[in-house]
Amino acid sequence: MTARIWHGYTIRTNAEEYETLLKTEIFPGIESKHLTGFKSIQLLKRVLTNEVEFITIMLFTSLNDIKAFTGDDYETAYVPAKARAILLHFDERAQHYEIEEHRVYE
């Protein structure tokens, strides 16, 4: 399993608009592609002094599945134009990590 991790930042007054965009358009758009090997997406949010940080963590079965989503330059961030218009700054490249162990406790 491979995790694709990305960071984006907004000013505080745009945080709610950006979060809504993620939840109502961007995530459903990704899900509607029915990507092979795509397992899940998580959204993390942290309010900082002058901005709000968002982190997305996408889980895929393999790096090849990520390349099917992004193309051969798989580290390039997927940031639609609507998101770019709201974000203050963001990672141009996503990071990828192999998940060595995953435990879920209920």
Image (cartoon, rainbow, N blue to C red):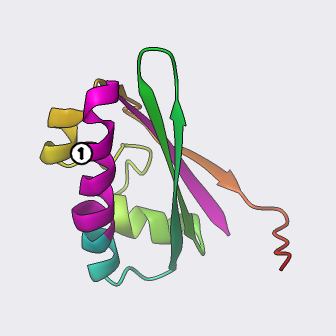
Residue 5 shown left or right of residue 20 in the figure: right
Q: Name the foreground residue: 93 vs 57.
A: 57
Depth check: give the residue in front, 43 or 2. Answer: 43
Between residue 11 and residue 66, name the one nearer to us: 11
Task: Quadrant for residue 60, please give it.
Answer: bottom right
Specify whether 71 is left or right of 75: left
Residue at 36 percent of width and 32 percent of height: 92
Q: Is residue 19 above or below residue 70?
A: above
In the rendered image of this protein, does residue 90 appear above or below residue 56? above
Q: Which residue is mark 1?
A: 17
Percent across and percent down for residue 27 are 33, 66
Say what amino acid the circle numbered 1 marks.
Answer: Glu
Give the quarter of the image for residue 101. Answer: bottom right
- Residue at left offset 50%, top offset 15%: 49
Taking 100 as reference, is 59 left or right?
Answer: left
Q: What percent of the width, then of the height, locates residue 67?
A: 42, 62
Mark 1, Cα crowd under 10 Å, few <14 / some 14-19 / many 20+, is few
Q: Residue at x 67, y 51 (%)?
A: 97
Q: Secondary structure at mark 1?
A: helix
Instruction: Measuring from the top left, give residue 91's x and y in whole percent.
Output: 41, 31
Residue furthest to the top = 50
How many dots with numbers?
A: 1
Front in this rendered view, residue 106 or 104: 106
| Residue 36, horizontal then vertical, whole percent | 44, 83
Residue 29 falls inside the magenta stretch: no
The C terminus lies in quadrant: bottom right
Q: Quadrant of the N terminus?
A: bottom right
Q: Magenta residues?
A: 1-27
